Protein backbone atom coordinates (compact mmCIF):
# COMPACT_ATOMS: atom_id res chain seq x y z
CA UNK A 1 0.00 0.00 0.00
CA UNK A 2 2.92 2.27 -0.82
CA UNK A 3 5.29 3.05 -3.67
CA UNK A 4 7.75 5.70 -4.85
CA UNK A 5 9.40 7.16 -7.94
CA UNK A 6 12.73 9.01 -8.08
CA UNK A 7 13.82 11.47 -10.79
CA UNK A 8 17.16 13.28 -10.99
CA UNK A 9 16.85 17.02 -11.63
CA UNK A 10 19.70 19.34 -12.60
CA UNK A 11 18.67 21.99 -10.07
CA UNK A 12 19.29 22.96 -6.45
CA UNK A 13 17.15 21.30 -3.75
CA UNK A 14 15.75 24.63 -2.50
CA UNK A 15 14.56 25.62 -5.99
CA UNK A 16 12.75 22.29 -6.39
CA UNK A 17 11.33 22.42 -2.87
CA UNK A 18 9.80 25.85 -3.52
CA UNK A 19 7.77 24.40 -6.42
CA UNK A 20 6.76 21.22 -4.59
CA UNK A 21 5.68 23.02 -1.42
CA UNK A 22 3.65 25.66 -3.29
CA UNK A 23 0.42 23.66 -3.40
CA UNK A 24 -1.27 26.41 -5.43
CA UNK A 25 0.88 25.26 -8.40
CA UNK A 26 0.01 21.55 -8.18
CA UNK A 27 -2.27 21.78 -11.21
CA UNK A 28 0.78 22.58 -13.38
CA UNK A 29 2.43 19.29 -12.50
CA UNK A 30 -0.05 16.62 -11.38
CA UNK A 31 -2.09 14.58 -13.87
CA UNK A 32 -4.93 14.19 -11.32
CA UNK A 33 -4.84 17.11 -8.91
CA UNK A 34 -5.87 20.17 -10.89
CA UNK A 35 -5.78 22.78 -8.14
CA UNK A 36 -5.29 23.53 -4.46
CA UNK A 37 -5.56 26.41 -2.04
CA UNK A 38 -4.50 26.99 1.54
CA UNK A 39 -7.44 26.91 3.97
CA UNK A 40 -8.21 28.36 7.38
CA UNK A 41 -5.32 30.41 8.73
CA UNK A 42 -2.79 28.59 6.55
CA UNK A 43 -1.09 30.77 3.93
CA UNK A 44 1.90 28.67 2.92
CA UNK A 45 3.96 25.59 3.66
CA UNK A 46 4.39 24.96 7.39
CA UNK A 47 4.04 21.98 9.67
CA UNK A 48 0.31 21.56 10.43
CA UNK A 49 -0.85 23.88 7.63
CA UNK A 50 -3.97 22.74 5.77
CA UNK A 51 -4.97 23.02 2.15
CA UNK A 52 -7.80 21.78 -0.05
CA UNK A 53 -6.81 19.79 -3.12
CA UNK A 54 -9.09 19.37 -6.12
CA UNK A 55 -8.83 15.97 -7.82
CA UNK A 56 -10.03 14.52 -11.11
CA UNK A 57 -9.67 10.85 -10.14
CA UNK A 58 -8.14 8.71 -12.90
CA UNK A 59 -8.83 11.56 -15.35
CA UNK A 60 -12.31 10.26 -16.18
CA UNK A 61 -14.50 12.80 -14.48
CA UNK A 62 -14.86 11.79 -10.81
CA UNK A 63 -14.03 15.18 -9.32
CA UNK A 64 -13.83 15.89 -5.61
CA UNK A 65 -11.96 17.98 -3.05
CA UNK A 66 -10.01 16.77 -0.04
CA UNK A 67 -8.48 18.58 2.90
CA UNK A 68 -4.82 17.81 3.50
CA UNK A 69 -2.51 18.58 6.42
CA UNK A 70 1.23 19.20 6.04
CA UNK A 71 3.07 16.62 8.17
CA UNK A 72 6.67 17.24 7.07
CA UNK A 73 8.13 20.56 5.99
CA UNK A 74 11.90 21.02 5.79
CA UNK A 75 12.91 23.62 3.19
CA UNK A 76 15.25 22.13 0.61
CA UNK A 77 14.83 18.62 2.05
CA UNK A 78 11.26 17.35 2.34
CA UNK A 79 7.58 18.14 2.06
CA UNK A 80 4.76 15.73 2.95
CA UNK A 81 1.04 15.93 3.53
CA UNK A 82 -1.71 13.61 4.67
CA UNK A 83 -5.04 13.45 2.86
CA UNK A 84 -7.79 13.58 5.46
CA UNK A 85 -11.02 11.65 5.13
CA UNK A 86 -14.30 12.02 7.01
CA UNK A 87 -13.88 13.37 10.54
CA UNK A 88 -10.19 14.08 9.82
CA UNK A 89 -9.15 10.42 9.57
CA UNK A 90 -5.78 10.11 7.77
CA UNK A 91 -6.21 8.24 4.47
CA UNK A 92 -3.03 8.62 2.45
CA UNK A 93 0.30 10.40 2.92
CA UNK A 94 2.17 11.85 -0.06
CA UNK A 95 5.78 12.89 0.39
CA UNK A 96 8.68 14.41 -1.49
CA UNK A 97 12.28 13.92 -0.39
CA UNK A 98 15.16 15.80 -1.97
CA UNK A 99 18.72 14.50 -1.88
CA UNK A 100 21.63 16.47 -3.40
CA UNK A 101 23.46 14.32 -5.93
CA UNK A 102 26.33 15.46 -8.14
CA UNK A 103 25.08 18.13 -10.53
CA UNK A 104 21.60 18.31 -9.04
CA UNK A 105 19.05 16.63 -6.83
CA UNK A 106 17.36 13.24 -6.66
CA UNK A 107 13.69 13.88 -5.95
CA UNK A 108 11.56 11.02 -4.63
CA UNK A 109 7.78 11.22 -4.56
CA UNK A 110 5.97 8.52 -2.61
CA UNK A 111 2.57 7.60 -1.28
CA UNK A 112 1.53 5.42 1.63
CA UNK A 113 -2.06 4.41 2.34
CA UNK A 114 -2.80 4.34 6.05
CA UNK A 115 -3.44 0.96 7.64
CA UNK A 116 -7.24 1.02 7.78
CA UNK A 117 -9.39 -2.02 6.99
CA UNK A 118 -11.36 -0.38 4.14
CA UNK A 119 -8.10 0.74 2.52
CA UNK A 120 -6.53 -2.70 2.87
CA UNK A 121 -9.59 -4.24 1.18
CA UNK A 122 -9.52 -1.61 -1.56
CA UNK A 123 -5.83 -2.32 -2.18
CA UNK A 124 -6.48 -6.07 -2.38
CA UNK A 125 -9.15 -5.53 -5.03
CA UNK A 126 -7.83 -2.57 -7.04
CA UNK A 127 -4.25 -2.10 -5.87
CA UNK A 128 -2.72 -3.61 -8.99
CA UNK A 129 -4.32 -0.98 -11.23
CA UNK A 130 -4.27 1.97 -8.81
CA UNK A 131 -0.63 1.29 -7.94
CA UNK A 132 0.33 1.53 -11.61
CA UNK A 133 -1.69 4.73 -12.01
CA UNK A 134 0.03 6.25 -8.97
CA UNK A 135 3.51 5.29 -10.26
CA UNK A 136 2.76 6.70 -13.72
CA UNK A 137 1.33 9.91 -12.22
CA UNK A 138 4.27 10.37 -9.83
CA UNK A 139 6.69 9.99 -12.75
CA UNK A 140 4.68 12.49 -14.82
CA UNK A 141 4.54 14.96 -11.92
CA UNK A 142 8.27 14.77 -11.24
CA UNK A 143 9.17 15.06 -14.92
CA UNK A 144 6.96 18.16 -15.28
CA UNK A 145 8.69 19.72 -12.26
CA UNK A 146 12.05 18.71 -13.75
CA UNK A 147 11.17 20.50 -16.99
CA UNK A 148 10.35 23.72 -15.13
CA UNK A 149 13.39 23.76 -12.82
CA UNK A 150 15.87 22.75 -15.50
CA UNK A 151 14.54 25.40 -17.90
CA UNK A 152 14.87 28.02 -15.12
CA UNK A 153 18.49 26.93 -14.48
CA UNK A 154 19.54 27.83 -18.03
Image (spheres, helix red, strand yellow):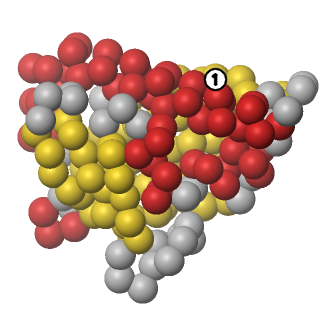
Relative horizontal placement of residue 23, taking residue 46 as reference (left or right)? left
Examine the image and state in which quarter residue 97 appears: top right
Q: Residue at x 21, y 28 (%)?
A: 58
Numbered disc 1: secondary structure: strand
Give coordinates of residue 48: x percent, y percent. Answer: 46, 72
As drawn, the residue found furthest toward the right would be 102
From where the camera sits, is residue 4 visible?
no
Examine the image and state in which quarter residue 33 appears: top left
Q: Residue at x 71, y 37 (%)?
A: 149
Relative horizontal placement of residue 99, taking residue 116 as reference (left or right)? right
Give coordinates of residue 105: x percent, y percent. Answer: 77, 32
Work out whether 92 lies above or below 65: above
Image quadrant holding the C terminus, namely: top right
Circle 1 residues within 10 Å: few <14, some 14–19, many ≥20: some
Relative horizontal placement of residue 74, taking residue 5 as reference (left or right)? right
Q: Residue at x 66, y 55 (%)?
A: 18
From where the camera sits, is residue 123 visible?
yes
Image quadrant holding the N terminus, namely: top left
Question: Nearest the camera: 84 or 28?
Answer: 28
Q: Which residue is mark 1?
A: 7
Work out whether 71 lies above or below 124: below
As drawn, the residue found furthest toward the bottom would be 41
Give coordinates of residue 138: x percent, y percent. Answer: 45, 28
Give coordinates of residue 34: x percent, y percent. Answer: 33, 45
Q: Residue at x 77, y 51 (%)?
A: 14
Amino acid sequence: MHDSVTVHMAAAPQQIWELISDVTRVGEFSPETFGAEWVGKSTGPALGAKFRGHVNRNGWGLKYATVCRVVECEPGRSFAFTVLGPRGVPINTWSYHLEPDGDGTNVTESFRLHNLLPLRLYWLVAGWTRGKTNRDNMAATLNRIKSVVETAEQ
